[in-house]
Amino acid sequence: MPQAATATRTPDVPTFDFDPFSREFFDDPYPAHEAMREAGPVVWIPRYQVWGMARHDDVHTAFNDWQTYCSGRGVGLSDFAKEEPWRPRSLLLEVDPPYHTKTRTVIARILSPGTIKRLRAPFEAYAEELVDRLVARGRFEAVKDLAEAYPLKVFPDAIGLPDAGREFLLPYGNMVFTGFGPRNYLFEEAMRDGDRVRQEIMRLCARESLRPDGLGAEIFAAADRGEITHEEAPMLMRSFLSAGVDTTVNALGAAMDCLARNPDQWQLLRGEPTLARNAFEETLRLESPSQVFFRTTTRAVDVGGVAIGEGQKVLLFMAAANRDPRRWQNPDKFDIRRRVAGHVALGSGIHGCVGQAVARLEGELVLTALAKRVETIEIVGEPKRRYNNTLRGLSSLPVEVRAKHH
Ligand code: HEM
């Protein structure tokens, strides 16, 4: 058990003897999500000796209290105070203020509203070009040909990456996100070619690799101005490459899946393409590409009468929070008109996704391009799940679309 005090104060902390990183759980996480939400604000997961939070209110509170729930000891299962991280820690995600404030300020400025405005034209052009091509084909693989193809082109272009080496982005993202979980079968699989992939990624993060007019070069310009060091700059580049690809790939794949499975919502979007942005947001809530993140307690804390000790790992089930009936009406329904603000799919608080405007731009433009050109979307083959310790998504979604007649 966690702490002696826990046992005496709260003899019956709800305990969940299950594996939230198993294939069985990934295939259908919803019954366990519900059971945890119903059990109380916090549950104990003995298999990993961690606490779990699944209610919206508690997950949101934890994200917004970095003084108690820190990121500096890792946002995965591994406690950096006790073991070496498998890769040098992220200088953005896995640090706390005051250091975090410095790196976050630099990256947030690079991804400012001005940047997003500049990215719109090239992002829109490629969304239209790609969707035109797919509509002409009629039948395509929505994950590979759309959900992967789109971010893998527009995002590295925006960063200023060379073409050579982009094939390592998805394997690296897979490693990073699975690496937040336990060292299980997925970890072994993802790390099989790990040294090579990490080397290639760090090569892409070097200043010499980058086009001078991309977002990556701006990180090095910040180093020239003394805002960060020249050693920190490639590490912050790495944050773009770890966090910016797989997440949007899974989000776009989920959006296609949700729209194909909900023809009424697809028809709504078709009739009113300006709903694209909210449809993407609703996908993030319902399918939450990043399903979980951990925090570590910096002090003893009472959560709804449960005493959690210092130095404890807390697993935040964002996907469960995003379907909490205490917060959402008909939470399991895909409703593109829903007032969806307040979901935690992009985190919340000081570490809340710094790339969220980029993600939303991609989602909006792809869904708008589809809404303007496509009449119906039909799933024409067995979708396949992609297994990862953190991310939820599909590896395959064969679809057929019928073009709109003008
Ligand atoms: C739909 C797509 C995306 C999802 C679901 C997503 C999700 C998240 C979440 C949940 C966090 C918070 C992690 C935590 O609090 O521990 C986060 C942080 C972050 N995201 Fe995203 N993200 C997406 C797209 C992007 C993109 C496109 C970029 C890059 C442009 C990006 C870069 C980052 C970075 C660098 C952080 C760390 C911020 C910090 O620690 O201060 N993300 N993201």
Image: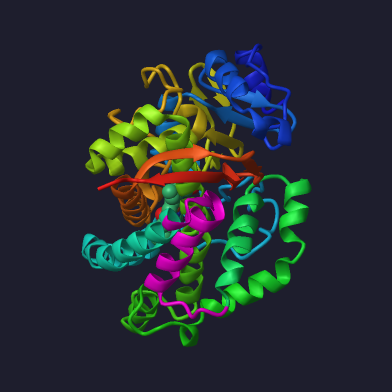
Give how far across and how far down residue 319 sits, in percent.
Answer: 50, 33
Magenta-colored segment: predominant secondary structure: helix
Q: Is residue 5 above or below residue 77?
A: above
- In the depicted view, which residue is nearer to us: 233 or 291? 291
Magenta extent: 136-164
Residue 81 location (% of width, % of height): 64, 52
Q: Is residue 55 above or below residue 249?
A: above
Residue at the extreme front: 405
Residue occupying image coordinates x 40% and y 83%: 211
Residue furthest to the top: 12
* Residue 226 position in % (x across, y down): 34, 80
Q: Which residue sits at x=61%, y=38%?
A: 313
Residue 342 makes an appearance in the image: no
Q: Residue at x 47, y 51 (%)?
A: 138
Direction from residue 319 to residue 25 in the image, left or right? right
- 160 in the magenta segment: yes
- Residue found at x 78% / y 54%: 188
Q: Quadrant of residue 193?
A: bottom right
In the depicted view, which residue is nearer to us: 110 or 161?
161
- Can the viewer see residue 90 in this picture? yes
Could you tell whether 116 is left or right of 49 in the image?
A: left
Horizontal side of 84 relative to 240 (left or right) equals right
Q: Position of residue 400 (x, y in %)?
A: 50, 45
Q: Number of labelled discs?
A: 0
